[in-house]
Amino acid sequence: MPQTRRDYYEVLGVDRSASPEELKRAYRTLAMRYHPDRNSGDPAAEERFKEVGEAYQVLSDPARRRQYDTFGQAGDGFGSPGGFNFQSAFDLFDMFFGGGQVGRGRSGPRRGADLRLQVSIGFEEAVRGVTRTFEVTKPAACEECGGTGAQRGTSPTTCTECQGRGQVQRVRQSLLGQMVTVEPCPRCRGEGQVIESPCPACHGQGVVDQRKSIEVQIPAGVDSEMQVRVPGEGAAGPRGGTPGDLFLVINVRPHDLLTRRGMTILYDCPITVSQAALGDTVEVPTVDGSATITIKPGTQYGEQLRIPGRGAPDPRTGRRGDQVVRLRVVIPTKLTERQRHLLRELSPPDGKPHPVRRGFFEHLKDAIGI
């Protein structure tokens, strides 16, 4: 089932106040538990290994952690397909543990590439969630050879240079003595197998371009620049490798009347001078239909009313924000003589306007010099 990425603190099983040492201990435990070499053939463990690496990479960097705490995964492209993938998870593991901690290296078919697709949806669709079907052209397993890359009737053979390990040792002399390095096998390119008779349909790659319809449930509450990950719908891995993921990059089209700021939906409500002075009951639009608000007598320009639970939901928790109605008093530009007379009667005797009530934020702006 398509899903958004989990909260990074939840992935590592730590509190949001966790110290760097606590993050390190959590990553060490989970990375060793879910390493593919300890869970051969288990795609769920492979996915958790990648997820744990991505979470630690962000939270172990103080600057990125602060940005994540503020903006979540929408900020700074966290988890973008080009920024962190299965190979990155291995690189982070090797850097953290010093390499060589798990026995056999990285032989075997390579994982397929992640794909990125720009998706445009309406304002209400983003708030409520929507199911969409997309046509995607991507590398898929070759039907002629079943994804092996070998001509029908044949099969890949074990590489004779690395004996199927996918890596070879090189020994060289230096001033410090013998230096032993481990590198991918040049004959099989780290796969441990070679194809003597390549499949003519895919030229030995095991994949061919294929157009596919993919139905995706976009969760309620997504916003522009957020990404929805569809596991396993990326490019197929060459020669039987596991497929990558498909990332939908969301673009939300603007609404005619409503705007959004995080989980809060904003509406600028025009009212007349008489409505502001005398009060009134008016209907305002929301994503759930019309709602009724009460304007109090003596309302000033810019005052705000809040409608609880009519905002956008958090994509991770489902909790909805509020809608804020900003009252905009519309001053008429064309008046009859009678209207002018009535407005003059409303003016104070000394000709000076009544002082405007100042709220908490106005006092705060004065205090900090904004």
Image (cartoon, rainbow, N blue to C red):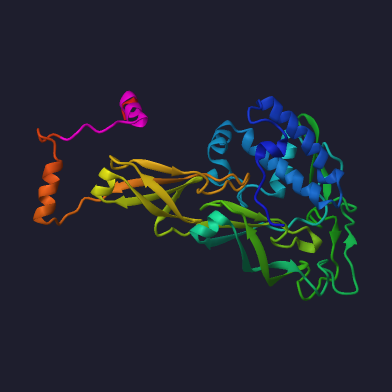
Could you say where residue 333 lies in the image, as x and y percent from the top left?
Answer: 16, 55
The answer to which of 273 and 28 lies nearer the viewer is: 273
Residues drawn in magenta: 353-367
Q: Considering the image in quadrants, where does the C terminus appear?
A: top left
The answer to which of 238 and 185 lies nearer the viewer is: 238
**In the image, is residue 26 part of the stretch drawn in magenta?**
no
The answer to which of 187 and 218 lies nearer the viewer is: 218
From where the camera sits, is residue 290 visible?
Answer: yes
Q: Residue furthest top?
A: 367
- In-image side of 58 versus 290 (left or right): right
* Above or below: residue 351 compared with residue 221: above
Could you say where residue 248 lies in the image, as x and y percent from the top left?
Answer: 60, 58
Q: Give me the residue at 70% from left, 31% from top.
A: 14
Could you say where residue 312 lies in the image, as x and y percent from the top left?
Answer: 52, 49
**In the image, is residue 363 part of the stretch drawn in magenta?**
yes
Q: Give me the residue at 62% from left, 67% from top.
A: 134
